[in-house]
Structures are given as structure tokens and as C-alpha cells.
Image (tube, rainbow, N blue to C red):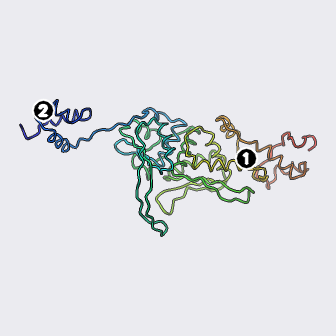
Amino acid sequence: MNKFWTDKEDQIIIDNYQTMQLKDIVKKYLPHRTYAATKRQKLRLKITKRQYTSVDENYFNEPNVQNCAIMGFIAADGCVTTNNRLIINLSYKDYDFLCKLANRIGYKGKIYVNEKRRLGEINGHKIDFIGKYCQLYTWETKKWIEDFKKHWNIVPRKTLILEPPNLTKLEHILSFCNGNLDGDGMITFSKNPEYKIPFCLHLQFMGTEKLMVWIKENFDKLTPTNKKAKVYKSKYANVHYYLVTGIRAYIIIKMMLSLDILRLDRKWNLAREYIGLIENNNNLSVEMLCKLNRMITPEIRQFIENNGSKIPDFQTLYWNKRIEINHGKLPEKIEKQKNSQLNLISFPNPPIINVVEKENL
């Protein structure tokens, strides 16, 4: 027996190891070698068994409302490796969400549940606990990785270099932003007594500076504002964030929720609660109704209704409120008030209202 391995023998191992058991290779092609010797030679050649995960390879072929939401989430919380793998690690409390995501993308592999000990310090307080997390792990998804880069500019080691996606349709842009909120973003309430409602909604998007500027520019086109909202750099990490509040946040959330996409209910239940406060609150101020009527354009209303959702008629609610606070009739100088600088909008002619007849106004 030749104790030195020939190039031909090495090639036999390389060519067959992916499809055959090592013991079968020895029996069929290398009967003059022992199993132990062949195994040692395989280790010297640094051959590893390729693993494949059954997925829908065409799911990300072209951007659509469904996959843009998932890609927004992957851009925030996913990991793309240099050897064509996708890894998503989430807290165990989001296990159900990860299962739904796996089902959407046609992932047939296992979702792993692991524990990890965390040591460190936050704001001067030492932390030491064991956290439970779930993981989705794909193998050999080269087609996906190519589509990720082509349509959404998602590449390995993206944390500090991620570019905005190549999206042009409004529903795709909003869907992607929805995914970013699910991943690294936050939806919160704060008190706002000015509008006489319990809370004001805050949407915080996080990511690279270029991505945040892209989100800001698209939201500014959708709901223009005179306020100088900026993209800020975090004081605690090399990350940027962009904040949307008030009526602009209501409109954006309303449009996002009109889309039938996968979302993290743990966050979005808070947004639905806020929408209920706006739409079912009979104590909204005239100023609030005025701003809502001005900022919700016919295009925004049509977008929401075309996706199967409803939005209140804030124009009628505004005039009803004016009639209510004036004891059943509008002020006599309503025409002068239309162009007054004290008002935020040029008021439209009042529609026919159920409270009182137009002729009696």
C-alpha cells in the first residue's frame, strides 16, 4: 500500500464527499485505504459537507409589498454572510413572528432556540443574565444574496455601509420602512396636552446616515412639513436615527397599516391603539381637526382606501366641531376667517352637515 496519497485519490474524495458517505467512498473507490486513513486525509484537504436549506429561491426575484417588508426587517436585524447564508437572531418572545417569516419565505429548515449569557455594564449597572433567543439559519442561498444586493443593496457587513434600496413605488417604500421599524425602530407614546388627547405618537427609524436621509426625503414628499426635522447621529453608537411625530406619524402609520404585510404585532398594537385614540375621540380640538384635514391629501386618502382601509372624513368633523362650539351655527365672519393668518389652512366651503341645514347657517 502506498502511504502517500496521490492527486487522483484526493480528487476522488473531493468529487464524491458531497453526495456519498465517507465509508461508501472507501468501499467503492478506495478499497486499499482504511476508513480512518481516509478520514484523516479528508481533514487535511479541509473538505466540509455542504448543507442545503429548502427555501423559495424566487421569493425575492422582484420587489413587491410582501418581500419589501421582510427586506426592511433583514436590513435592520438580519445578517448576510460572505458564504451566501442568511442569519436572523431574535429574542425568544418573537418566536412566533420568526415562524411566520420563515413560512413566508418558504424556509423549511429548523428554527433553533438557544440560550446565551450576557455580561456587561449599562449606565453604571452591571448586568449578568441568561437570555433566550431564536435563530433562523439558511445554507447556500446564493440566489437570494444576489437579489438582496440587486434590489435592496443589502450586502455582508452592512451595519455601517448600508445604502438605500432601489425602490420607486410608494407601497414598496412604505413596506420597507415598516420592516425597518420592526427591526431597529421604535413606536412610542408621549403626552401632548396641546391637542387635548392623551398621547402623541413617535416613530423612530435607525440605521446608516444614507438610509435615514432616504427615509426622510420620501416622508417629506408624502407629508411636507415646515419643521426642520433632521437625521441625528446617536451619542452612544455609530448609528443615525430619524424621528417622526404627531399628525405626520399618524398618516404614515395609517398608510403602513393599510398594507397587508408581515409585521411585529408587539410593536404595532401600540400604533393601532393610537389610531383608535385619534379616530374615536370626540374631544379633538378644532386645531387638530384642521391640521388633519389639511395634511390628509386626496392622494393619501385614495392610497389608504385602495388598500381596503378606511379613514374618517375630518373635513365634516371639523365643521361639526365649529358648529358645536358656536352653539349650533357658524360665526358670521367665516369668509374673513378663511384667509386669516390665524388659521392654519384656507378653510373649504362647509359641506351639507347633518347637525344643521346649510341654508340656516
- Give residue 95's position: percent from left, percent from top: 49, 46
In the image, farthest residue toward the right: 360
Q: In the image, residue 127 lies at what x, y percent?
A: 45, 65
Q: Nearer the viewer, residue 287 or 321?
A: 321
Amino acid at pointer 1:
Glu
Residue 10, position in %: x, y? 16, 37
Foreground: 123 or 338?
A: 123
Under circle 2, the secondary element is loop
Is 64 situated left or right of 247 in this image?
Answer: left
- Answer with left or right where residue 217 lies relative to residue 286: left
Residue 279's disc is 1
Relative to residue 173, is residue 121 depicted above or below?
below
Image disc number at residue 33: none
Label 1 or label 2, whichever comes before in sequence order:
2
The furthest residue to the left: 1
* Amino acid type, mark 2: Pro
Q: Is residue 257 left or right of residue 193?
A: left
Picture quarter with the C terminus: top right
- Tell me the residue at 47%/36% (across/down): 105
Circle nearer the viewer, 1 or 2: 2
Q: Which residue is mark 2?
A: 31
Callout 1 secondary element: helix
Residue 153, percent across and down? 45, 43
Q: CA distance from mark 1 to mark 2?
A: 79 Å
